[in-house]
Structure formats: structure tokens, C-alpha cells
Amino acid sequence: MRSLKLEEIEEEYKDLWPGGHWRPKECKSRQKVAIVVPYRNREPHLRTFLHNIHRFLQKQQLDYAIFIVEQLGNKLPFNKGRLTNIGVLEAIRVYPFDCIVFHDIDTYPENDNLLYRCSTDPKYTRHFSVYLERAKYIERYAEFVGGVLALTVEQLRKVNGYSNDFWGWGAEDDDLNNRVKLANMSFTRSKTNISRFRNTIHERDSGNAPDP
């Protein structure tokens, strides 16, 4: 997994618009996709993520932008839910996105054939990262929707986004799954090799203990 300096990434992807936005010149994408990434204190992972995800998304001829939403300081535990909600609000403020992909910064798709799109059926949301390298590519518990997932803007309105109340690691994804169910929707998963994801190995930071 290659990691470049930020200046090298900017040079390699010089056709990006301001704000990390790109769209193909030869065709019109079926969906406009915002990639929302919660982040704190992990610049090496950020550089690896940006370099690899831009290549992956541009191969798919997507109209996309990446929103890195940073929590500053270490006084408070990490709050993934608040960061993702902020990212969504900022994304729909600046561009008419149809689809929001929530993406952990240490997780990378292995298969270029995995299309980062939202479901066209309003009853279904999508969970992409079914098989994770750190879990030895074994499917986790049935309700797991962490890592990489996609909802349309309208679906997010129905579930009222993520909860803002979970501080520290975990629980916010399970809560989102419950919100999706209460809105009479469900997650779809492709249980094939197309849903394999690599992970950057790291220690959990001291401000990101499990949520009690």
C-alpha cells in the first residue's frame, strides 16, 4: 500500500478541483458521491488513504468529492457520529450529492470492481466492507455495518443521521443499523470476494477507548 507526501499526492492528482472534487470529462456519472471520512491524529494513514482512494474512485468514473472531517485535540474522546454528521451537512451544502459513503481512514477496497454507489432501491442501504483483513476476512456479527457503508441523502434524512451521543470507539455503527431498521430499511451486502478490504494496522489512540 503506497503512501506519498501530501505534496506528491497533489501533484499526481493535479486535475482535482478545489476541495478534493473530481468528475470525468468523457461521461456523466449516474450518481454524485461524497466520501465522508472522520479523522484525528493519523496523518500517515490519511496520506495512504488519499493516494489509494483517488485512484480507485477515478477508475470508476465517479463524480465524487472527499470530505476529511477532523476532530482537533485529545481532551475529548473521538466522536465518529458527530464528525460524520458534520461531513454530510458540509457536503450537501456545497454540491448536490445523491449518495454519501462513510469511510474509515484505515480501510481500503481490494477489488476495483466494487462500485461505490448507493442502492437505487430506497428500501436498501449498502454495507461494503463485509470482509476485513484485520478480521482474517471472516464475516463479523450479522448486524455489523462498520468500515465502509453508503446511504442516499434521502435515506440519511429518514434515519436522522448518526447519533451524536457516542464518545470513544464503537457503538455508533450498531446504533445506525437500528435507525435503518426503524425506518423500514435494511443493509445489503455482497458476500463475495468483491467485498474484501485491507486495513492499516495501528494502535487505538488513548482518546478513543471503547464507549461504555
Image (cartoon, rainbow, N blue to C red):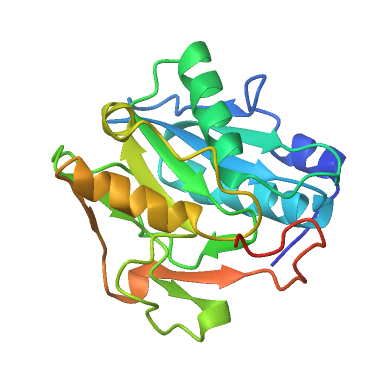
Q: Is residue 191 above or below residue 22?
A: below
Could you tell me which quadrant the N terminus lies in? Answer: bottom right
In the image, taking residue 148 as reference, residue 99 lies left or right, namely: left
Near-viewer residue (105 or 63):
105
Residue 116 visible somewhere in the drawing:
no
Residue 188 visible somewhere in the drawing:
yes
Q: Is residue 141 above or below residue 190?
A: below
Residue at 81%, 36% in the rendered image:
72
Tell me where residue 15 appears, x and y as whole percent.
Answer: 64, 27
In the image, taking residue 37 as reference, residue 121 lies left or right, namely: left
Q: Quadrant of residue 61?
A: top left
Tell me where residue 98 appears, x and y as whole percent.
Answer: 33, 26
In the image, taking residue 198 as reference, residue 13 lies left or right, namely: right
Q: Residue furthest front?
A: 212
Near-viewer residue (159 or 31):
159
Q: Quadrant of residue 117?
A: top left
Q: Is residue 141 above or below residue 62?
A: below
Tell me where residue 43 appears, x and y as whole percent.
Answer: 82, 50
Residue at 49%, 28% in the rendered image:
88
